[in-house]
Image: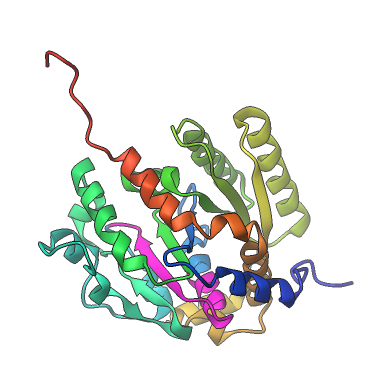
């Protein structure tokens, strides 16, 4: 019997999606990766999906938006000298600002580092968030895919990125607490003033395929019934001992263990996501920054105050 982790669209679909993505400036896919709770493997998946797309010829940038507790650089085996606080504090004009912060990573992926242990980044106010997002925009002009790794949960900055993103990749584990927290994230998003978005689900660290499929199906059915939000299941990634080995060595997993079961599953998810609704999603970077501007617009005071 074939492995449940091998099912994937043919490579021709990936090639077509890549070719379709070439063209107009800033018509890139903008995908935020979030989770309801920590420990789901969100950052691990964000990094390795980005690496796989880069291996397929995409120009990919990873943005570490786990502000204050960033660790994408660890997963990628990098040691950046600067981070987003540098971008926030810069006094230079917007054009071209921040591109010097991009760090070349494995397989051609570029990293825009967040800050680890930077307390102020974890508690930005509204005007600071607006300035940070404005300064991010010119850094991301030249890429086919922008992957934003968020902090787990629904902090102020995380909720902004989730609310403005046209495409969300939600990572969960099959255990009940992770499923409940994933539902909570979708529920909060259902109250957002911006409703047009795609939400995808990945079940990660799966030990029991049947149980994981059942948990995922229940989550999808519940969100559609009670929140009127359609969520698409992208696939399952198995628990794999090789992941811990690569992480301990600070080697990108997909490059270090390319033939492992988890690596095969990640490639399958990467194909599905790259091939899904690509024609519309290519404009999603522009959509994200337009939505962010709307959400972060200065609030007008009521007359007489």
**Residue situated in front as seen by the camera: 197 or 17:** 17
**Residue situated in front as seen by the camera: 247 or 218:** 218
Q: Position of residue 178 (x, y in %)?
A: 55, 47
Residue 249 in sight in this render? no
Relative to residue 177, is residue 282 depicted above or below? below
Residue 248, picture quadrant:
bottom left
The verdict on residue 266 being magenta is no
Where are the magenta residues, as a range? Answer: 47-67
Q: Is residue 31 left or right of residue 290?
A: right
**Residue situated in front as seen by the camera: 115 or 103:** 103
The N terminus, quarter of image? bottom right
The C terminus, quarter of image? top left
Q: Position of residue 15 (x, y in %)?
A: 66, 76
**What residue occupies the far top of the structure in this picture?**
304
**What residue occupies the far front of the structure in this picture?**
24
Residue 180, picture quadrant:
top right
Q: Is residue 292 left or right of residue 221?
A: left
Relative to residue 238, is residue 12 depicted above or below? below
The total number of labels drawn is 0
Relative to residue 63, is residue 192 depicted above or below? above
Residue at image position (21%, 51%) is 131
Residue at image position (67%, 84%) is 259
Q: Position of residue 215 (x, y in %)?
A: 70, 46
Q: Is residue 302 left or right of residue 148?
A: left
Relative to residue 38, is residue 17 depicted above or below? below
Residue at image position (48%, 85%) is 107
Residue 289 in sight in this render? yes
Q: Position of residue 261 (x, y in %)?
A: 69, 76
The verdict on residue 57 being magenta is yes
Residue at image position (49%, 47%) is 36
């Amino acid at each position: 019997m074939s492995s449940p982790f091998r099912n994937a669209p043919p490579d021709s679909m990936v090639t077509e999606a890549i070719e379709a993505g070439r063209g107009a400036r800033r018509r890139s896919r903008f995908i935020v990766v979030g989770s309801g709770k920590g420990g789901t493997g969100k950052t691990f998946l964000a990094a390795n999906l980005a690496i796989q797309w880069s291996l397929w010829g995409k120009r990919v940038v990873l943005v570490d938006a786990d502000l204050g507790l960033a660790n994408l650089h660890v997963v990628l085996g990098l040691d950046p000298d600067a981070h987003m606080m540098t971008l926030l504090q810069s006094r230079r004009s917007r054009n071209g600002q921040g591109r010097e912060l991009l760090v070349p990573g494995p397989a051609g992926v570029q990293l825009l580092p967040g800050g680890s242990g930077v307390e102020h980044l974890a508690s930005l106010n509204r005007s600071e968030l607006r300035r940070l997002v404005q300064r991010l925009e010119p850094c991301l002009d030249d890429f086919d895919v922008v992957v934003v790794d968020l902090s787990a949960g629904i902090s102020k900055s995380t909720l902004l990125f989730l609310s403005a993103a046209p495409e969300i990749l939600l990572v969960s584990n099959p255990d009940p607490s992770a499923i409940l927290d994933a539902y909570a994230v979708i529920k909060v998003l259902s109250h957002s003033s911006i409703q047009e978005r795609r939400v995808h689900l990945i079940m990660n660290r799966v030990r029991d395929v049947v149980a994981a499929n059942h948990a995922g199906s229940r989550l999808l059915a519940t969100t559609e019934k009670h929140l009127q939000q359609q969520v698409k299941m992208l696939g399952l990634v198995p628990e794999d001992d090789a992941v811990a080995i690569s992480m301990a060595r600070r080697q990108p997993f997909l490059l270090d263990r390319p033939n492992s079961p988890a690596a095969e599953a990640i490639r399958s998810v990467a194909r599905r996501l790259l091939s899904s609704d690509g024609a519309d999603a290519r404009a999603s970077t522009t959509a994200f920054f337009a939505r962010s501007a709307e959400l972060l617009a200065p609030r007008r005071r009521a007359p007489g105050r």
